[in-house]
């Protein structure tokens, strides 16, 4: 079960999209920090023209028609194979809470395993990953959910019952469980046709991005490099829009 859950965390389109976006952002950052000086060196090494007009044309073209990094399937599979044993063991090291619902029902989605954000980290601008998430949650059936807790996050009322616990579900728990599913979905939510587990939820639009960049990258550009872009009609708002594409 731990290996299956680990596979869901590693194999989904969200992982591939995250890789693509991080690689594209790293490429953009490299271009911004290197500026036209670095661009001229690259063009020279490739035997391309390095006059002012040629360099400016390539510089403007990169921002107006940016190169998008794309991680290939074999790279994703290699990442999955490398990470699967470690993620599986990380899940096995957690305390497991199996919740059983008698009346309430659960939904699932195209990314069924939800990594619950670590509030202590998000308050300081840091992210949550598989190993530092206080809870990792997954609906197993219409009436069973599994929550995997870090030992430090294991609820005190459950501590006396041991490390792994079976627990009866209530309405509030079902509501929270289904909210995790809604937050984890990218494009699709699923439930049994006889159930209404998503009633009352304000369902979001499909998620188009995995990585958000909040840095003011326009200010990182050299003044002369910025001016070339401004003269071509490309400004700070265009760069912000580029990061959101």
Image (tube, helix red, strand yellow):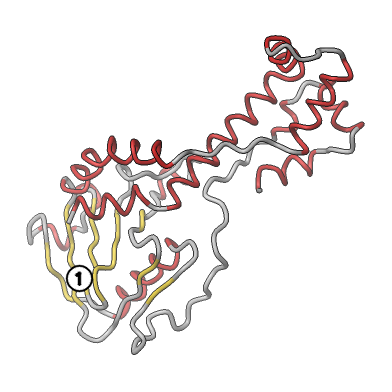
Relative depth, front residue between 128 and 62: 62
Q: Is residue 201 left or right of residue 114?
A: right
Relative depth, front residue between 67 and 97: 67
Q: Is residue 8 left or right of residue 62?
A: left
Which x, y percent locates residue 234? 84, 38
Q: Quadrant of residue 174?
A: bottom left
Residue at x 22%, y 73% (from the top left corner): 144
Give the position of the N terminus as an image quadrant: bottom left
Q: Quadrant of residue 175?
A: bottom left
At label 1, counting other C-alpha atoms closer than 10 Å, the crowd grade (few under 14, some 14-19, many 20 or more) is: many
**Total numbered labels:** 1
Which x, y percent locates residue 209? 56, 52
Q: Is residue 218 left or right of residue 213?
A: right
The residue at which mark 1 appears reads as: 99
- Looking at the image, residue 44 lies above or below residue 192: above
Badge 1 marks a residue whose secondary structure is: strand
Which x, y percent locates residue 199? 44, 83
Q: Is residue 65 left or right of residue 102?
A: right
Residue at x 73%, y 20% (from the top left corner): 35
Relative depth, front residue between 210 and 65: 65
Residue at x 92%, y 31% (from the top left corner): 231
Residue at x 87%, y 26% (from the top left corner): 228
Which x, y percent locates residue 145? 24, 68
Specify the farthest residue to the right: 231
Q: Quadrant of residue 4?
A: bottom left
- Looking at the image, residue 19 lies above or below residue 117: above
């Amino acid at each position: 079960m731990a290996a299956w859950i680990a596979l869901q965390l590693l194999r989904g389109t969200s992982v591939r999209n995250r890789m693509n976006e991080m690689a594209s952002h790293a490429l953009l950052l490299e271009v911004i920090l290197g500026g036209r000086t670095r661009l001229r060196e690259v063009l020279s090494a490739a035997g391309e023209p390095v006059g002012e007009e040629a360099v400016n044309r390539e510089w403007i073209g990169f921002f107006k028609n940016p190169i998008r990094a794309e991680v290939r399937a074999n790279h994703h599979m290699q990442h999955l194979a490398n990470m699967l044993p470690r993620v599986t063991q990380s899940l096995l090291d957690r305390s497991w809470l199996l919740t059983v619902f008698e009346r309430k029902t659960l939904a699932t989605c195209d990314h069924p395993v939800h990594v619950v954000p670590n509030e202590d980290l998000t308050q300081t601008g840091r992210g949550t990953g598989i190993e530092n998430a206080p809870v990792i949650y997954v609906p197993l059936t219409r009436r069973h959910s599994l929550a995997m807790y870090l030992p430090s996050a294991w609820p005190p009322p459950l501590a006396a019952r041991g490390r792994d616990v079976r627990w009866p579900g209530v309405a509030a728990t079902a509501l929270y469980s289904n909210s995790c599913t809604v937050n984890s979905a990218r494009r699709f939510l699923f439930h049994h046709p006889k159930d209404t587990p998503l009633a009352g939820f304000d369902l979001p639009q499909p998620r188009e991005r995995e990585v958000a960049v909040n840095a003011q990258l326009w200010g990182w550009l050299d003044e002369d490099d910025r001016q070339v872009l401004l003269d071509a009609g490309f400004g700070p708002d265009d760069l912000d829009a580029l990061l959101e594409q």
